[in-house]
Image (cartoon, grey):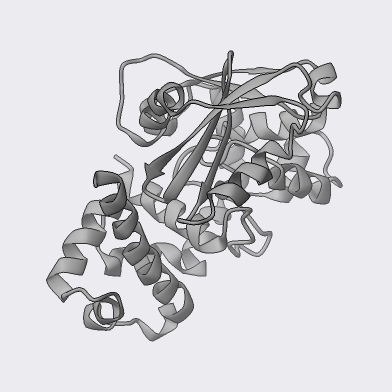
């Protein structure tokens, strides 16, 4: 019942986010946002504030391109500071640090042959989360809406088609709780990166972007010593299998535009706004 209620809440919030994203220039009123989702103004205000940590009006400011450009304005120094800070730097996911390791290139080239991957579906602030684990830690995290579970599984499992998959929600539940909860016990969230050497280097760089900040594809390429590889960086970011935790949503276009996202641009806006609302 709680699972369904949380998903219903996200469906309403998602509809409001789409309205805001499409019509932000019109500055829609609270009434205009609440009516299409069948809520009163007071109900929407409470639901949205509980979900995002700020009001619809405040969230609207987060979604504008001006906000993205403001984040971009000093992105070079932000990236430098983030890279210097290491994995325990500022803005870690819920104040947790992430311990990560990369699988051997052989596992990647063998398309996961010999790996056993447990998976499960769990409610999250951004729809249904599909969580995948190896014995070493979290290796996959994606989002889908109700009815999209099979497609979400095929998308992630397609990264490592020769692995053996075992549904085990009891095993994946604690990882979902750590990612979307507010646990501050000082223990690292363990993740496993399975990709090419270049992809892993890009994903490791993403881990160091502070929450509430954004960088460009070009700046990541430059930080890797490959300033002309922005397109290759974009391709690697698009293949990131651990959404939200490895924050590919914090990468924007060179103009400051919120560019595409594998799990949907509306969801990318939602995550950025949710992070902005949860900043200390």
**Residue, far left:** 42
Name the one closer to the observer, 8 or 30.
8
Residue 185 visible somewhere in the drawing: yes
The vertical placement of 19 against 154, above or below, is below
The vertical placement of 258 against 178, above or below, is below
Residue 89 pos. (x, y %): 48, 25
Task: Say which residue appears at 64% left-offset and 60% top-offset.
Answer: 260
The image quadrant where one finds the C terminus is top left
Residue 70 visible somewhere in the drawing: no
The vertical placement of 19 against 213, above or below, is below
Q: How many marks?
A: 0
Task: Say which residue appears at 75% left-offset and 42% top-offset.
Answer: 236
Task: Say which residue appears at 24% left-offset and 45% top-offset.
Answer: 2
Location of residue 112 (image quadrant): top right
Location of residue 162 (image quadrant): top right
Left or right of 14? Residue 266 is right
Residue 145 pos. (x, y %): 47, 56
Task: Say which residue appears at 56% left-offset and 62% top-offset.
Answer: 265
Name the one closer to the observer, 182 or 225.
182
Left or right of 175? Residue 50 is left
Name the one closer to the observer, 186 or 240.
240
Residue 186 pos. (x, y %): 36, 15
Residue 231 pos. (x, y %): 81, 51
């Amino acid at each position: 019942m709680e699972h369904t209620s949380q998903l219903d809440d996200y469906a309403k919030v998602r509809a409001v986010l789409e309205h805001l994203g499409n019509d932000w220039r019109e500055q829609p009123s609270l009434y205009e946002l609440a009516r299409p989702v069948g809520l009163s103004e007071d109900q929407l205000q409470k639901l949205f504030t509980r979900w995002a940590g700020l009001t619809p009006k405040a969230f609207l400011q987060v979604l504008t391109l001006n906000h993205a450009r403001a984040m971009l304005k000093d992105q070079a120094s932000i990236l430098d500071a983030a890279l210097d800070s290491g994995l325990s730097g500022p803005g870690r996911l819920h104040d947790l640090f992430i311990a990560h390791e990369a699988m051997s290139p052989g596992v990647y080239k063998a398309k996961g042959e010999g790996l056993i991957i447990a998976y499960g579906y769990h409610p999250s602030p951004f729809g249904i989360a599909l969580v995948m684990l190896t014995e070493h830690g979290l290796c996959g995290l994606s989002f889908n809406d109700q009815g999209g579970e099979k497609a979400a599984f095929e998308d992630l499992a397609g990264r490592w088609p020769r692995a053996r998959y075992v549904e085990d929600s009891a095993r994946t539940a604690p990882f979902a709780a750590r990612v979307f909860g507010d646990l501050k016990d000082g223990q690292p969230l363990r993740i496993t990166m399975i990709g090419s050497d270049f992809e892993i280097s890009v994903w490791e760089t993403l881990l160091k972007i502070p929450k509430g900040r954004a960088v460009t594809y070009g700046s990541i390429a430059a930080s890797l010593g490959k300033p002309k590889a922005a397109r290759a960086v974009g391709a690697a970011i698009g293949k990131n299998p651990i959404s939200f935790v490895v924050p590919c949503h914090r990468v924007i276009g060179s103009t400051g535009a919120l560019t595409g996202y594998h799990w949907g641009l509306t969801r990318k806006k939602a995550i950025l706004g949710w992070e902005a609302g949860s900043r200390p």
